[in-house]
């Protein structure tokens, strides 16, 4: 009778086994008239600060450190401000306005210069951002502007009407250079801050603003006003007879609507410091998500959002979104020198704002791009990014403290693989958190593995074609909702593994492909960029910034979402340049070989970084070849003199394939395929293995696991149970895809998920399916309580064959040993023949064996033969 039984000596006892709140201006409803639309445009684009008066600078506050790479410190010139040093890359979180910069009086006579100082702080105009680095970058390693919690989320900044004030004498400003003007209006200028904002000249202060659709723009500085003169195309400018640049705002009028008092983003210094830019350029910024993307913060005393994006080959980049009615003309970004990073701080923009980057390529064409570093996205099929600040408070400190207490190789590790979108169709992250942890805990699995949760446009890809590497899919909720799911799993004692896909990405023209008009994230050689199997693009692992994007992404999921491991997809396709390619379709490496040294270096760096920064986390490779040292440490050289890839575990694809071939055969023919079940032990200890029955094995015509078995329904279930028993007792960790735990007969489909109705008590065959699920529960229970099944998974001395050559009988028998030498005897009968008095030779020592589990037990739907695994020692005692 088919079955797997486990026994142990009767004398042996079983082993016991936050982020701050930020002010935000909600997007206004679409106005009905052009004038109203323009007014709303201005409202969303730049909300006013708390008062229209010129205020004194806030006291200095220390800035947090940013960037954890090991690159040397880079000091950049300091921006002088009213006799003090202004830290332009560090946000000050005070209530006052930033200190002004006094650039010296103009050469014109004082009588023509207008009023003297207007009181309060004096603010200098923004510096140009050309050359080798950002203009006026900070003289500090504390480079990243800090977010503050000055106001509540989604609270609109009030609009204010300015009171009448004395007019400052103005005259037309010198016209912009025709080329600069054309490039500025076309979104193709690298330094809009050099033309917009306020700039001190010999003639006075030149103010210039770009406000499309506005009818008037007035500079308001304390008790003074200076109305700017229209230059056409939305540009307003004038020279005010002032000797220094005041702390000012803009009063903007659209049509007949009330004027709006707003902060000018082009008077702001860069909100990203030189040290961060240095680390980005070197590809060593281990917290890249903290400096690139959209970050609500208070900068120079103004609440808003800092937008940054890496696009080194772009002619220009603009921010656009619902707050500009998707016209980015008024929001061009500045280039921060040779780093390739573009930056713009927009006052009044906060959490929930929908945005994209309008990227102008070298040929002048524009594309609207989602933010590669977006931490939240719109729900597909929409493709925009969303400004996000997390406010989640974790409750899993105990779990994090103990998860690394025992090496994963010497601990129980059984995994339930889940596709969240179809496990219970219609449930989001928070609803899943109320059901999934309890179900997994009841079945006794130690971990869940989630198919990719990062944002992806096509649901049929199951998440393996990612466009938003830093954002959990909006189909199921917000990033904080996903944190809640992970938290609840941890509180139930269940680890969380996430599928991670650094091997390839889709070609959607709003995402990563040719992001700045050139091959940026993908390899420039089409023979290396094009993935022949999936119609996707492969990353350029040799480029510092691309490697940094991926390494930081791995640590991001572990640190920000507390995941306990990453299962890395399609590793083999990364390692081999000729993967799925015919002769002439691939180019060799610099040594003439077929391996990809850049991918090897990337995987080594990723693993080393994750293990260093995230104790207790495990990385798992889906690697289907005989590559040497996949789970060997990166600092331990192998037969070719290079270190291992550094993974913690590797999927045993050979065991999975061979064992399923054997099980698919009729028992009468299995004698000719016996080696399929024994060959895995030839290489079982060459790597640290996971035995996977994954989603890939139950789709696309392969059939569900029980459907692969021969015979009628009773025989299929008997084979299914015997196979699960063999799997749980074989050296290595276990992984089982959802639906297989209760012998679902149909293939999995992401459209409807598991057939839960099979467990409905009103269904006549429900006991058959419930019996298999009960077996899985008992397998996990015995597994967790029996150190012989996991303590020496990666130690050859923890295994010994008893019978490996009984091919005619379809019988396998072997011993597993715990760290203290306690043996466990496993006997598998893969034939339908009941074998009475079947004799096996076992070691001397134990005089009797007691049964632990029998897969043919009646409670699991079996025949219930009496103690088929009550065995004796070889001397007949």
Image (cartoon, rainbow, N blue to C red):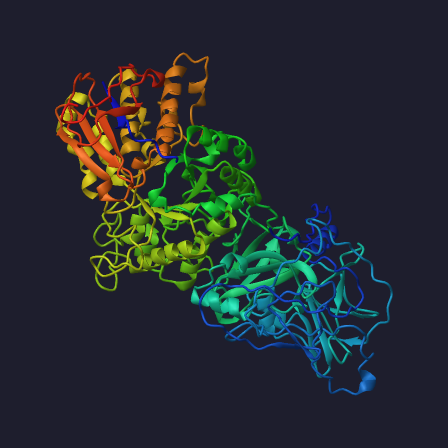
Residue depicted at x 46% and y 64%? 69
Please determine whether, in this image, residue 353 is positioned above or below residue 249: above
Is 155 located above or below residue 462 in the figure? below
Identify the image quadrant of the N terminus. top left
Residue lying at 72% horizontally and 50% vertically, measured from the top left: 155
Q: Residue at x 22, y 42 (%)?
A: 797
**Residue 668 placement, left or right of 9:** left
Is 389 left or right of 862, judged from the image as shown?
right
Which part of the image, by quadrant, shows the C terminus? top left
Taking 144 as reference, is 405 left or right?
left
Residue 256 appears in the picture as rendered: yes
**Toward the viewer: 389 or 582?**
389
Q: Please give the count of numbered marks on the rendered protein.
A: 0
Residue 442 placement: quadrant = top left
Q: Is residue 266 or residue 209 the one in the foreground?
A: 266
Q: Residue 784 in the image: x percent, y percent?
A: 37, 34
Identify the image quadrant of residue 240.
bottom right
Question: Can residue 332 be seen?
Answer: no
Query: Residue 588, position in %: x, y?
Result: 24, 59
Quadrant assignment, res 49:
bottom right
Q: Is residue 796 above or below residue 113?
A: above
Considering depth in this image, is 200 or 174 the residue closer to the camera? 200
- From the top left corner, tell me how far across and down residue 238 is, in percent: 74, 73
Q: Is residue 860 left or right of residue 260?
A: left
Residue 122 percent across, percent down from the top left: 74, 74
């Amino acid at each position: 009778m088919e079955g797997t039984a486990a026994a142990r000596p009767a004398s042996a006892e079983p082993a016991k086994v936050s982020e701050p709140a930020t002010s935000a201006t909600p997007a206004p409803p679409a106005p009905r008239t052009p004038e109203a639309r323009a007014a709303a445009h201005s409202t969303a684009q730049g909300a006013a600060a708390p008062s229209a008066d010129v205020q004194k600078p806030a006291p200095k506050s220390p800035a947090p450190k940013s960037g954890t790479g090991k690159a040397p410190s880079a000091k950049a010139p300091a921006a002088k401000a009213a006799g003090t040093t202004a830290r332009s890359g560090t946000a000050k979180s005070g209530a006052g306005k930033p200190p002004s910069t006094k650039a010296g009086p103009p050469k014109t006579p004082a009588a023509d210069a207008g009023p003297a100082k207007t009181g309060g702080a004096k603010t200098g105009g923004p510096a140009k951002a050309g050359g080798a680095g950002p203009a006026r970058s900070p003289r500090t390693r504390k480079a990243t502007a800090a977010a503050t919690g000055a106001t509540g989320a989604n609270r609109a900044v009030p609009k204010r009407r300015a009171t009448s004030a004395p007019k400052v004498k103005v005259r037309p400003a010198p016209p912009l250079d025709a080329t600069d003007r054309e490039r500025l209006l076309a979104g193709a200028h690298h330094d809009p801050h050099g033309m917009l904002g306020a700039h001190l000249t010999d003639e006075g202060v030149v103010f210039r603003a770009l406000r499309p659709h506005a009818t008037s723009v007035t500079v308001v500085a304390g008790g003074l006003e200076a109305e700017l003169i229209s230059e056409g195309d939305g540009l307003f400018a004038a020279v005010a007879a002032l000797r220094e640049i005041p702390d000012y705002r803009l009063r903007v009028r659209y049509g007949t609507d009330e004027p709006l008092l707003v902060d000018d983003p082009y008077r702001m210094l860069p909100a990203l410091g030189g040290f961060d830019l240095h680390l980005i350029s070197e590809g060593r910024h281990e917290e890249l998500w903290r400096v690139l993307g959209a970050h609500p913060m208070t900068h120079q005393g103004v609440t808003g959002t800092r937008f940054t994006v890496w696009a080194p080959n772009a002619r220009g980049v603009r921010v656009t979104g619902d707050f500009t009615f998707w016209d980015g003309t008024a929001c061009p970004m500045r280039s921060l020198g040779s780093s390739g990073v573009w930056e713009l701080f927009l006052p009044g923009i906060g959490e929930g704002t929908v945005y994209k980057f309008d990227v102008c390529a070298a040929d002048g064409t524009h594309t609207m791009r989602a933010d590669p570093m977006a931490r939240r996205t719109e729900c597909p099929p929409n493709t925009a990014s969303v400004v996000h600040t997390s406010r989640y408070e974790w409750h899993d400190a105990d779990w994090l403290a103990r998860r690394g207490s025992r090496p994963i190789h010497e601990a129980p590790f059984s995994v339930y693989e889940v596709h969240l979108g179809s496990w219970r169709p219609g449930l989001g992250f928070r609803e899943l958190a109320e059901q999934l942890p309890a179900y997994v805990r009841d079945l006794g699995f130690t971990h869940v593995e989630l198919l990719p949760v990062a944002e992806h446009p096509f649901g049929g890809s199951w998440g393996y074609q990612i466009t938003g590497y830093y954002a959990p899919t909006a189909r199921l909720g917000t990033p904080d909702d996903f944190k809640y799911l992970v938290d609840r799993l941890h509180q139930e004692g269940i680890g969380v593994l996430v599928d991670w896909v650094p091997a390839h990405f889709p070609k959607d023209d709003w995402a990563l492909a040719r992001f700045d008009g050139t091959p940026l994230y993908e390899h420039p050689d089409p023979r290396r960029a094009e993935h022949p199997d999936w119609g996707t693009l492969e990353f350029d692992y040799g480029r510092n910034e691309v490697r940094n994007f991926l390494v930081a992404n791995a640590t991001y999921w572990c640190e920000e979402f507390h995941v306990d491991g990453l299962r890395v997809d399609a590793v083999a396709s990364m390692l081999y340049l000729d993967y799925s390619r015919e002769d002439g379709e691939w180019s060799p490496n610099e040594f003439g070989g077929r391996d990809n040294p850049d991918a090897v270096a990337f995987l080594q760096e990723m693993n080393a970084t994750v293990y260093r920064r995230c104790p207790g986390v495990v990385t798992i490779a889906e690697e289907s070849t005989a590559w040497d040292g996949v789970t060997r440490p990166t600092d331990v050289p192998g037969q070719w003199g290079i270190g291992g890839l550094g993974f913690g575990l590797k999927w045993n694809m050979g065991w999975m394939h061979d064992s399923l071939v054997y099980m698919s055969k009729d028992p009468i023919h299995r004698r000719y395929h016996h080696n399929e079940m024994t060959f895995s032990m030839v290489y079982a200890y060459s790597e640290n293995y996971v035995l996977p029955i994954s989603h890939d094995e139950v789709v696309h015509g392969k059939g569900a696991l029980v459907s692969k078995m021969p015979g009628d329904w009773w025989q299929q279930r008997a084979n299914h149970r015997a196979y699960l028993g063999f799997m749980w007792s074989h050296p290595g960790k276990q992984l089982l895809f959802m639906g297989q735990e209760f012998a679902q007969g149909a293939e999995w489909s992401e459209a409807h998920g598991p057939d839960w109705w099979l467990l409905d008590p009103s269904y006549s065959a429900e006991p058959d399916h419930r019996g298999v699920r009960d077996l899985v529960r008992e397998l996990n229970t015995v597994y967790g309580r029996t150190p012989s099944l996991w303590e020496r998974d990666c130690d050859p001395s923890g295994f010994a064959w008893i019978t490996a050559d009984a091919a005619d009988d379809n019988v396998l028998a072997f011993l597993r040993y715990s760290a203290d030498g306690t043996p466990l005897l496993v006997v598998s009968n893969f034939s339908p023949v009941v074998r009475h008095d079947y004799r096996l030779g076992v070691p001397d020592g134990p005089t009797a064996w007691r049964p632990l589990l029998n897969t043919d037990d009646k409670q699991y739907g079996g025949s219930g033969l009496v103690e088929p695994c009550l065995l004796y020692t070889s001397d007949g005692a």
